[in-house]
Amino acid sequence: MISVLMIVHMEDKRLVKRLLAGDERAFEGFFEENFARLYRFALSRLGGDDALAQEAAQRSLIRAIDRLHTYRAEAALFTWLCTICRNQIIDMQRSDARRDKHVVLTEDHPHIQAMVEAIAAPVAESPDAEYQRRESIRLIQVALDKLPARYGNVLEWKYIEGYSVVEIAAKLDVGREAAQSLIARAKRAFADVYGTLVEGLKMTTQSVTHHE
Amino acid sequence: MSELPNNQGHESEAAIEALFAEAEPRPVPSPDATLLAKKVVREAWEKRVRRKRTLRRVAVAASIAVATMLAIQLQPTPSATLPQFAVVERLDGVASKVGDNGRLDRIGTGAAIRIGETIRTEYSAGLALDWHQGGSLRLDEHSEIVFVADNEIKLNSGRIYYDSKNDRVDAHSLLVRTELGVVEHRGTQFMTEIRDSDALSVSVREGEVSINGRYHQAVAEAGQQVILRGNRRPEERRINTYGADWEWIASVSPSVDTTGMSIHDVLMWVQKETGLTIRYETEAARKEAIRVVVSGMDEIDNPMVALRNAAAIADLMVNREEGNGVIRISL
């Protein structure tokens, strides 16, 4: 059975082909689907700096445009874009001015700070629960961004912003049934991706614990 | 961290609702930033699409020309009938054409270079090419270029120097493409270098050059060097048009037949090859240099040796001023 993700790669390949052919609608779709997601990808890696994240996303798309002919659709287009974004972020962080602004010292990292503070604090006031909550929220957002843009959007509209199926159908300019079908497919894809992320996190945590 | 059940029924719907109950909307970039980014990215895309169309047209034109020539030949030998765009005028050290699968075929003086071919110099090597569209193209050691079209090369790595010899009425502009930007000129002498794979350096000895990088554009004039490094602001600085950085160019100067040349002609050739300035101390010295015609002088390919020999023939004194690149000629 062909998985949802494999179908997406084929769509990505067709999109890139249309982009290279100068298809205006392909460009619109390419930008709309990826700029905000790349921005969020960069935001968490640049210490939440809004301006830098916007710059990183912009540079990444420009670089991607230049390298479009090298995209082989072996990975999702967004995954490929994230690799480019990661390298752009490294370049930006190498710059002296930016490094001074955004180096996060180990003891200043919120996670570490929280752990240190938790040692002295009574259990009832431990920030671990808050940290877990924030991480949970972040993981959901990461999972939504890893989905095709339309899937992530419909799930966010329905379950986070509270839009009805009818309202979602209107936003997408599709029929009610088509919107319901899309939401169902998006949920399945989200369950796959989120489950994989949680499994991966568990394995990482166990590995760290074992080494300790 | 909450997990989701594997089934797809009501439990799954409830689980997702529970999971999203604590979630927040994803952060989004500001509308202004989004508009600006879209404009900039669109410009890059449009340029990319136009470039692809231009290259496709050039490639198509070249392939048509090739096909026509092959049809005429009864026993086509493709390498002999492809149009030549340059000939190796001078070679020091080892240089090769890079064939399929990276195979290296050594080349020598007189070798013809054709569209689509790639040449590479080894360490301590250098070569000079007579460019059929006009001009002299030189390649420094450990450098590689691809001949993309009759007025376009791609510098993959290393350093090139181009002298358009703009005294020719049919002199064409040369486009030098690199991974970091495009360098275009008309009527100039300039040097382009890719450093450490992430910096494009353009040094201009004469004339003007435009540089179109991925993030910035710049214009470099005579006596200027511009370096594009990633997305940083271009670095610009004044440079000498002679000296250590330029010496490799004179080391692969193509041979010049001096028969019928005046001493003045030889000195002007030295000036062009070295970037030094020839200055006559007196009008009498200049007239003598014009009056004396070279006879019995070998072909010259070394500017400084040519300078000494020319001065000796015309009984002229040569004094090199330290620090300012001026050579004074007197009786």
Image: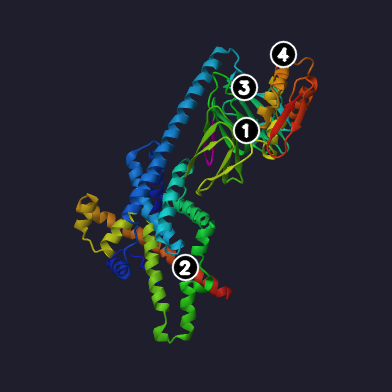
Question: In front: A139, or B203?
Answer: B203
On whether residue B223 falls in the magenta region, the answer is no
**Could you confirm whether marks 2 and 1 are on the same chain?**
no
Badge 3 or badge 1: first in the primary sequence: 3
For label 4, the residue is: B260
User: Can you say which quadrant of the picture contains the C terminus of chain B?
Assistant: top right
Numbered badge on residue B79:
3
On whether residue B178 falls in the magenta region, the answer is yes
Q: CA distance from mark 4 to mark 2?
A: 82 Å
User: Can you say which quadrant of the picture contains the N terminus of chain B?
Assistant: bottom left
Q: CA distance from mark 2 to mark 1?
A: 54 Å
Q: CA distance from mark 3 to mark 4?
A: 37 Å
Residue placed farthest to the bottom in the image?
A122
Residue type at tag 3: Ser
What is the secondary structure assignment of the residue under circle 3? Answer: helix
Could you tell me which residue is drawn at 39 percent across and 38 percent down?
B46
Badge 3 or badge 4: first in the primary sequence: 3
Q: Chain of mark 4?
A: B
Residue type at tag 2: Leu
What is the secondary structure assignment of the residue under circle 1? Answer: strand
Magenta residues, start to end:
B175-182
Question: In front: B189, or A64?
Answer: B189
The vertical placement of B290 against A128, above or below, is: above
Nearer the camera: disc 2 or disc 1? 1
Nearer the camera: disc 3 or disc 1? 1
